[in-house]
Amino acid sequence: MPRITRKKQIELLIISDSEVITVTAAHTSSRLFLCCIQYTMASGNEQNKSANRLHVIDWQTYFMASAFLARHRSKDPHCQVGACIVNDDNKIIGTGYNGLPMGFDDDEFLWAKRNESKYAYVCHAVTNAIIFRNTSNVKGCTIYVTLFPSNECAKLIIQSGIKKVIYFTDVKNEGADLNAEASKRMFEAANVEYKQYEATYDFQLTFVKRQA
């Protein structure tokens, strides 16, 4: 199996240590792809070989994994965020990640956090997931996010009718997010339920390329 870069290894160790979803990617010059999925139930129960597969991931893990996959589409070098909107039938109706608006040249706008920063231009993951949904509305839906929604995203969640937020973490790479407290206060006032994702699996999804 090809060597995974140091940056990807660090991400893998951090997420695995928390017993949550891991999404990593290794790149070589090969044209062939290998998708390897490994997971173990926290309970450690053995599967009866004569029965159906018992060790399947639950819906929450599936949707949070989808948010993590969306996150890896972001070109932001400092903070990548993913979101996944799900209806009552457990159908995904929208995904999004943080990035520049459509039609923008990513190389013409800075991704820096200071001076002429990215913040004035970047669309958040929640915003993109709601805007590019594949249905007429998201009322009553649940949104899975890798990072707790900002205060602006919280307003959009409330106004769009989403009633539940499942988040992976409320701490940014650079430290605590003060906007998260404002978001929580707004959610409570609007009766929008929010809770942190609770891992029931140590789940790893790895995409690598094989040598030709």
Image (spheres, rainbow, N blue to C red):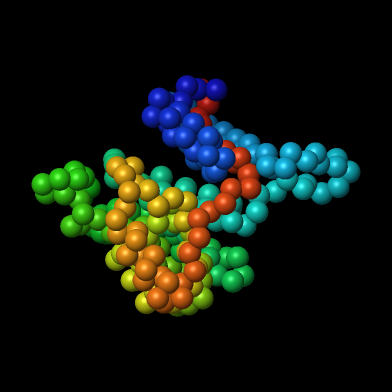
Image coordinates for residue 57, horizontal then vertical, percent: 66, 49
Q: Tell me the quadrant of the picture where the N terminus can be found.
A: top right
Q: Quadrant of residue 160?
A: bottom left
Residue at the spot 60% in from the left edge and 35% down from the top edge: 36
Residue at the spot 36% in from the left edge and 71% down from the top edge: 186
Image coordinates for residue 194, horizontal then vertical, percent: 48, 64
Q: Is residue 15 above or below residue 196?
A: above
Q: Is residue 145 above or below residue 156?
A: above
Residue at the spot 85% in from the left edge and 42% down from the top edge: 48
Q: Is residue 165 above or below residue 117?
A: below
Instruction: Name the foreground residue: 109 vs 47.
Output: 47
Q: Quadrant of residue 110?
A: top left
Q: Determine whether, in the image, residue 166 is placed left or right of residue 57.
A: left
Q: Residue furthest right?
A: 50
Image coordinates for residue 58, horizontal then vertical, percent: 65, 54
Q: Residue furthest left?
A: 115
One can see residue 121 in this view: yes
Total marks shown come to 0
Residue at the spot 85% in from the left edge and 40% down from the top edge: 49
Instruction: Name the foreground residue: 13 vs 205.
Output: 13
Q: Quadrant of residue 60?
A: bottom right
One can see residue 110 in this view: no
Image coordinates for residue 40, horizontal then vertical, percent: 68, 39
